[in-house]
Amino acid sequence: MTRLRRALRTPEQRRTIRREALVVFVGLPAFVILLSALTGCSVASSYVDKGIEKLSADNVEQEYAKVIEGWNNLSVAADNACLAQSGSAAENGPTLVESPAAAYAAVYRTQVADYNSRQADIFKADLVGPPGYPASVPAFPEAVGAQPDFCSISVKLAALKEAA
């Protein structure tokens, strides 16, 4: 029956059917491939743009400032915790609910986390961080426990900065 139907079609009808089949089976997949390639180029272009932005002078300057500020805040937090630890409470002094040393210890831990996350993040200071600053601050065992020793941590931070 299909031969009979083909025989009944005119040559013009057969050409039209071939053109429609060519559009459906060749043109449509070619369009989809072209669209996918353009999308891929757009994604690749956005990665290149991000890399250029990351290495730009403005971004490097900004990351230098943030790393240096983070390091200074970290050092000051350790020094403040040391001073709060070594200060003795006066007999007639106020009763404190929380010791200042514990509060400074919390600030120090926050500063360590912020500094380490900035230095490790490839989209922040990992590639463009300033020279002369440690890539990360180790978790000093003196910083934990019931009686943390922030005076020795201050000394270790200074040595870590010197070694960088």
Image: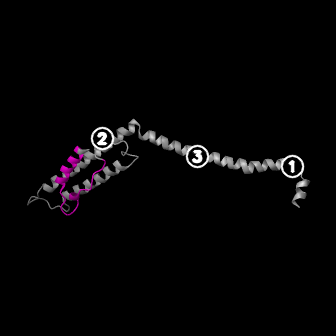
Q: Mark 3 near mark 1, Cβ–Cβ under 8 Å? A: no
The mark nearer the N terminus, 2 or 3, is 3
Q: At which x and y percent is residue 110? A: 29, 54
The N terminus lies in quadrant: bottom right
Secondary element at image label 3: helix
Q: At which x and y percent is residue 111? A: 28, 52
**Boundaries of the magenta span:** 135-162
Provide the residue designation for mark 1.
13
The reply, left or right, for residue 12 in relation to residue 159 is: right
The reply, left or right, for residue 2 in relation to residue 109 is: right
Is 22 covered by the magenta stretch?
no
Q: Mark 2 near mark 3, Cβ–Cβ under 8 Å? A: no
Label 2 crowd bin: few (<14), some (14–19), many (20+), radius 10 Å: few
- Residue drawn at the location 42% of the way across and 41% of the way down: 54
Provide the residue designation for mark 2.
131
- Residue drawn at the location 90% of the way across and 49% of the way down: 10
The mark nearer the N terminus, 3 or 1, is 1
Q: Amino acid at mark 3?
A: Thr
Provide the residue designation for mark 3.
39
- Residue drawn at the location 64% of the way across and 45% of the way down: 34
Distance from disc 2 to disc 3, alpha carbons, whole Å, reads 38 Å
